[in-house]
C-alpha cells in the first residue's frame, strides 16, 4: 500500500501568491483503498465528477485532513473532471482522450480562489476533495513554501498547466 503513496510521482504546481512549486504528492488512504477495491475487488471506483481544491493552514496527510482556511470569502474551487479541464497524456493543453506514454495530466484552465476579505493565515498545504464542504480527500500535499494570505491580497491561483500529476 505504501507504494501507492508514490503512485503520482511528479506533481509540480505554481500557486500564485502561495508557493512557486511543489514536487511530489500523495494519494490519501481513502483514495488508495478505493483504487485497490476497484482494481482487485471489483468495486466501483467512485471517483468524483468534480474535485474541489482546498487550502490548509496546518498539515494534511494521507490519513488526516489539515485545518482548512475559513472565513474571509474563502471557498474551495471546483474543477470538473473533463477532457476540457485536464490535459490528455500526449501533451499539455490537449483536450482529447489520452494517448501519450507518460501518464501525465495538468490543469487546462486557471484555478482561482476568491480574493481574501480577511486574513487566511499561513497556507501550507492543499487538498483535492470530493465535495464543496466536507467530502473525501483524494490528494494532500504540502506547498514548497508556506504563504501568509492577508485581507486584500490578490486572489491566489494555479496557472494553466501548473498543477501536474504523473501516474507511474
Image (tube, helix red, strand yellow):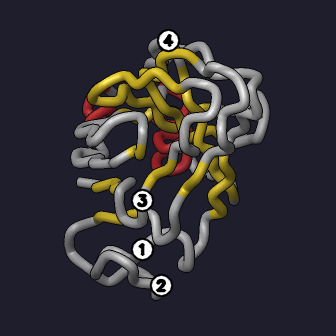
Q: Which residue is mark 1?
A: 87
- CB under 8 Å between discs 3 and 4: no
Mark 3 element type: loop
Mark 2 element type: loop
Label drawn at residue 159:
3
- CB under 8 Å between discs 1 and 2: yes
What distance separates the C-alpha of mark 2 from that of mark 3?
Answer: 17 Å
Q: Name the foreground residue: 110 vs 63.
A: 110
Label drawn at residue 95:
2
Q: Position of residue 120 (x, y in %)?
A: 61, 21
- Foreground label between 1 and 3: 3
Q: Which residue is mark 4?
A: 58
Residue 76, relative to residue 62: is it above or below?
below
- CB under 8 Å between discs 4 and 2: no
Q: Is residue 62 visible?
A: no
- CB under 8 Å between discs 2 and 3: no
Q: Name the foreground residue: 168 vs 135.
A: 135
- CB under 8 Å between discs 1 and 3: no
Q: Is residue 98 left or right of residue 57?
A: left
Q: Is residue 19 visible?
A: yes
Q: Earlier in the sequence, mark 2 or mark 3?
A: 2
Q: Position of residue 14 (x, y in %)?
A: 34, 48
Residue drawn at the location 48% of the way across and 17% of the way down: 122
Amino acid at each position: 500500500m505504501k507504494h501507492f503513496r508514490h503512485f503520482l510521482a511528479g506533481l509540480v504546481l505554481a500557486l500564485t501568491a502561495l508557493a512557486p512549486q511543489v514536487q511530489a504528492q500523495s494519494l490519501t488512504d481513502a483514495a488508495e483503498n478505493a483504487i485497490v477495491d476497484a482494481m482487485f475487488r471489483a468495486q466501483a471506483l467512485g471517483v468524483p465528477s468534480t474535485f474541489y481544491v482546498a487550502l490548509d493552514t496546518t498539515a494534511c496527510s494521507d490519513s488526516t485532513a489539515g485545518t482548512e482556511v475559513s472565513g474571509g470569502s474563502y471557498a474551495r474551487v471546483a474543477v470538473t473532471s473533463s477532457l476540457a479541464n485536464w490535459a490528455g497524456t500526449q501533451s499539455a493543453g490537449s483536450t482529447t482522450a489520452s494517448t501519450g506514454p507518460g501518464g501525465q495530466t495538468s490543469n487546462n484552465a486557471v484555478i482561482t480562489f476568491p480574493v481574501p476579505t480577511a486574513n487566511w493565515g499561513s497556507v501550507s498545504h492543499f487538498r483535492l476533495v470530493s465535495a464543496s464542504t466536507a467530502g473525501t480527500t483524494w490528494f494532500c500535499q504540502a506547498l514548497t513554501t508556506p504563504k501568509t494570505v492577508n485581507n486584500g491580497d490578490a486572489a491566489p491561483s494555479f496557472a494553466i498547466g501548473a498543477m501536474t500529476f504523473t501516474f507511474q
